[in-house]
Amino acid sequence: MREAIIDTGAITANVRRLKTVAGVPEFIAVVKADGYGHGALRSARAAIDGGATRVATADLEEAMALVRQGIREVPVLAWSHRPGPTLSVAAAHGIEIGVGSNEQLEAAAAAAGAGRPTRIHIQLETGPGRGGASLEDWPTLFTRARRLHESGRIDVVGLFSHLSGASRQDDLGQVRAFDQGVDIANLARLDPPLLHLAATSAAIWLPEARFNAVRVGLGIYGLSPTRDESSAPIGLRPAMTLRAPVVAVRRVGAHHGVSYDHTYRTSRSTTLALVPLGYADGIPRSASYEGAVTLHGRRYPLAGRIAMDQLVIDVGDDAVRVGDVVTVFGDPARGAVSADEWARAAGTINYEIVTRIGARVTRRSIGALQDPARGRNRVTRPLAPSGTRRRGGPAVISAFPARPPGWS
Ligand SMILES: *Cc1c(COP(=O)(O)O)cnc(C)c1O
């Protein structure tokens, strides 16, 4: 009844597009939080089809689930873990593990098996103050990692860090700090094949941060990481469409109060349609007064408060029947309200809109939605060469030469 249609063809195309934009050989598709609500397994598969060379999750458990479900053709990386036995199990599954401290490094080494070093990516703290080793720990961490690498207990696959996106200046400062980390690692004779700093935003707008790998989440689902730019101009297509059928239609007179507290009153006689999607399904209650949906290609405002299980729309005198399908959000190029618009209405970001879709909503894959408009809304900006690459990888062809997303 409540469904989120996932266009896996869009995910594949988005990965292809972003990989071209970033122009780096390694593309790590981030499928944490159940693929940002799209389903981790289907998102991983679709991303691999589009050229992803690795997939990543936050938690080790999510990474292990992917391996058990058959993601074997590319390595799976997970960077968020706590001390405990899970690490050994994850290492035995072949998961690549993010390591951000001496303790984590020793735990990773202890999780190695005979002839099976634990594969790690060393996480450097360069700004956001979350995970990762701080500058003063880098020399000892790298030296120890080098020793463990030589003894065959760990295999250092990558160095990475995460941008805070506070401002362009801040991010460039982080790029310099990361560069410094790479130099210090090299001095300790560590030269990992993968260097990754950029998530979606930097993969698109900050060539300096691309190194030879990008780690992209939101963009592969076709959403833009900034409020200043929507998906279509950057050549991305939203993959999720949230919809549900009308379950009741009611004709009411003027001044009819709707939903809790009667915060909405009809201005004239009208038709109200009941849609079985509420805040338990991830429709933010705070969007009650600005949210809108589409039905038969027309847009309707919400009437009154979003309830736990349902919302009401005022369709005026339009003909609406039980069973007609209401689209809450989807691809605006196909006429749907966007997840971005819902985010604005709720005072949040599109990341939160898609990741919070509830467990009652059935996810269903569609290979590639048939769309007459497809192709027209794709790449709307010419590709232009950007600055030269600093490390590895082919020459960069970038559509977005350092165009800052709302940075001061
Ligand atoms: C979530 C996450 C990403 C992906 O970020 P997007 O903005 O969704 O591309 C990359 N790296 C880390 C460490 C993350 O936590």
Image (cartoon, rainbow, N blue to C red):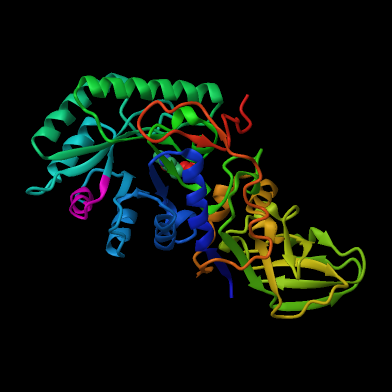
Image x and y of residue 102, in percent: 21, 30
Helix, strand or loop for the magenta stretch, by majority: helix
The quadrant of the image that shows the N terminus is: bottom right
Query: Considering depth in this image, is 386 or 326 the residue closer to the camera?
Result: 386
Give the residues in magenta: 86-96
Task: Please indicate whether residue 352 sits to the left or right of residue 209 in the image.
Answer: right
Q: Is residue 98 magenta?
A: no
Task: Please indicate whether residue 73 sits to the left or right of residue 283 in the image.
Answer: left
- Identify the residue at image location x=16%, y=28%: 144
Image x and y of residue 226, in percent: 60, 39
Quadrant location, ligand no. 1: top left
Q: How many marks?
A: 0
- Identify the residue at image location x=57%, y=63%: 281
- Vertical placement of residue 95 versus 192, above or below: below
- Vertical placement of residue 7 versus 97, above or below: below
Residue 303 visible in rendering: no
